[in-house]
Image (cartoon, rainbow, N blue to C red):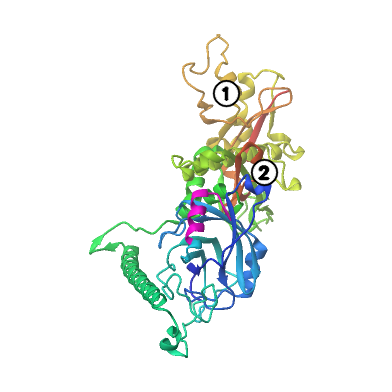
Amino acid sequence: MSKKTLMVDTLMLDASDFKPVKLTEEEAGQYSAHWTAPIWNIGKINLNGRVYTQDLAERVCKENKATGVCDGHDPDYHYEYANYVAVAKNPRIDNGQLVIDLYFVDEDYAMKLDKLRAMGVGIGVSSVGYGEQDADGVVNPLTYELIRYCDFVQYPANSTYASPAGDKPASQGSAGQGENKETDSQGPAMATAGKSSEEKHMEEKKKEGMASTEQAMDEQKRNLDDEQKKNAAGASGIVDGEKKPSQTMSESKKFVNRIIEAVTVGTSFAGTVPTEIASEIVKKRNTLAQIRGIATVHQASGDYKIAVESTGVTVAYTGEGAAIGDSTPDVSVLTLSAYKIAALVKASRESLTDPAVDVQQYLVDSIGKAMAEFEENEFLNGTGSSNNHITGILTTLALTANKAQVITAASATALTWDDVSQIDAVLSAYAPNATLVMNPATANAIRLLKDGGGHFIFPQNEPLSMVLGHRVLESKFMPKIATGASVIVAGDFSYYHIADRQGLDVQVLNELYAANDQVGIKAVERLDGNCALPEAFCVVKMA
């Protein structure tokens, strides 16, 4: 098999291939016309030289996607957001062909096609997908990815011109199968025998029209070939002997266009976020995620294990020649798993399909912010592996085994400087690298503390940024001052470990919020977090 490539395949159809279907009362409120049409010949060579197998057709039917149908497609950018004129859905196998329903949303376009069809003009339907094929042109049914069932085209797509419009191989019936055209064994003389002079004149005019069509198609083919050569040169950045920026559509653009297509047509979409967009989302998340910025972060493909020494090596004086006492460190293992978290962003359908809206930046900003906030809450308050959740620092320090790391305030409703000033003593050797995390309301209460002489301890014209020489981070996910609340967590956060599973997935949910004409965009990542050394932290807890 070759590498996965763009596959664009056309059937040239005439009036008998399109079957109008009467719209139901419900459909009439959404669509202007309903046709059925074939898009592939199954198990036979199609116009572009490919063979789509029965297994692939059955898989497409089982997936049962709905896709947009465009008014033509650019020969290079088949992901480009074009003019949608219909919705294609309900794939099925009928008489050796893959057949679909076409529901038109553009009434004028449907009427125009119907007139052309009635006049006997050949109409092309051209499918778009990505896949692999072998030396015989057989498409791999396991790796093929359908993008759109079809677009309407005037000529066979992708520089394949096996048969001009309306001139189909005699061996294939009404829908073109790409087989070699066979010559009538009786010869042209027998074929025209018995015809009137008027019929012969009409036939000559038809031949002239077909010759003109073929000439136009040859010209288009030459233009396409020239364009493909330019694109091939453009891939290396050289066009007409000069360095030019690449014209190839980025994976990010393709991804965003597929989301727009799903929103426009009203279908579901799920896929892995391209590296470029994922990197921007991660960058946005990291900019906003304060705990992640001071913790130790690992990239992992599976469970990540950390060796944690709970009792140290004994060191003591020893006499000359005397035996050296040994000790065995007690080493435990902290395992970081991968819990799935999902950020759900709701947006109006109009905003996502408005050309003025930068959908990629919207995804980056909204998903990055949502994930940063969720993570920060979990890194502080997560309830732990028993609930299949991240283990937060406050959860770890609430354990009885870590009660030595708890500073209990003198009051249940107010902090004093005496409460706060104990932090360094509890942290001991871990104090030099400590950071204090607290709710903004708590930070403001500390900023207003006064000394014994009634003077403010901290400057009043600026936010609280340092306490005891340690950096202060404000988080809305820390508890506010209240009875029994842990209002400050302090420590060396490099001992809090985060394991990220690589990859970020996005899913478009059209139906869930349809009543409000909104679309849900769900982003999923996998990660875990846990405290490797509780003694590197302490909390100030209200009485």
Q: Which mark is residue 171?
A: none
Q: Determine whether 233 is above or below 182 in the image.
A: above
Magenta highlight range? 103-116
Q: CA distance from mark 2 to mark 1?
A: 40 Å
Q: Can you identify the residue that label 2 sits on?
A: 512
Position in image of residue 150 (x %, y %): 52, 61
The front one of 112 and 227 is 112
Question: Label 2's element?
Answer: loop
Q: Is residue 111 magenta?
A: yes
Coordinates of residue 196 in the picture (x, y in percent): 42, 79
Q: Main secondary structure of the magenta part?
A: helix
Looking at the image, residue 405 sits to the left or right of residue 274; the answer is: right
- Residue 6 sits inside the magenta stretch: no
Q: Which residue is mark 1?
A: 443
Q: Residue at x 33, y 68 (%)?
A: 216
Q: Looking at the image, is 485 positioned above or below residue 325?
A: above
Considering only vertical position in the picture, is 214 above or below 277?
Answer: below
Question: Relative to residue 169, is residue 218 drawn left or right?
Answer: left
**Front position among marks 2 and 1:** 2
Badge 1 local density, few (<14 within 10 Å), some, or many (20+)? many
Which amino acid lies under the numbered mark 2 shown in the image of this protein?
Leu
* Pointer 2 or 1: first along the chain: 1
Instruction: Give the residue at the far top of this rendering.
Output: 453
